Amino acid sequence: MRRNSANGDVARSWASTYPALEAGEASVVDPLLGAVLGRPPVSFASRLRELLEIGAEPRKEISGWLDNGRGPAR
């Protein structure tokens, strides 16, 4: 703990993350994300709702996200 305190109180900085997220400080959407994905980004809630509506199998869906269409992750 002494080492963390000497480096700017890491614990206090980390603890402030949650109120900052709640206040929307991480809600910036950079256009680069859409370029990387090759499609407009959607919120997690929207994507989850869509998956539940179509009855997708979560394991297969997550596996597809991880391997990005290139086969199983290694």
Image (cartoon, helix red, strand yellow):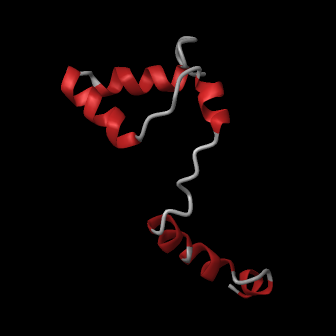
Left or right of residue 36, residue 25 in this image:
left
Q: Which residue lies furthest to the right in this view?
A: 6
Left or right of residue 13, residue 41 in this image:
left
For the point 22% across and 30% down, the residue is 52
For the point 56% across and 63% down, the residue is 25
Residue 19 drawn at (x, y percent)? 48, 74
Q: Total of numbered circles in the picture? A: 0
Residue 22 drawn at (x, y percent)? 44, 67
Left or right of residue 61, residue 67 in this image:
right
Q: In the depicted view, which residue is nearer to us: 10 or 24?
A: 24
Q: In the depicted view, which residue is nearer to us: 39 or 6?
A: 39
Residue 12 drawn at (x, y percent)? 61, 82
For the point 79% across and 80% down, the residue is 7
* Quarter of the figure that contains the N terminus: bottom right
* Quarter of the figure that contains the C terminus: top right
Vertical placement of residue 43 versus 64, above or below = below
For the point 73% across and 80% down, the residue is 4
Vertical placement of residue 53 versus 29, above or below = above
Vertical placement of residue 34 versus 20, above or below = above
Q: In the depicted view, which residue is nearer to us: 34 or 51?
A: 34
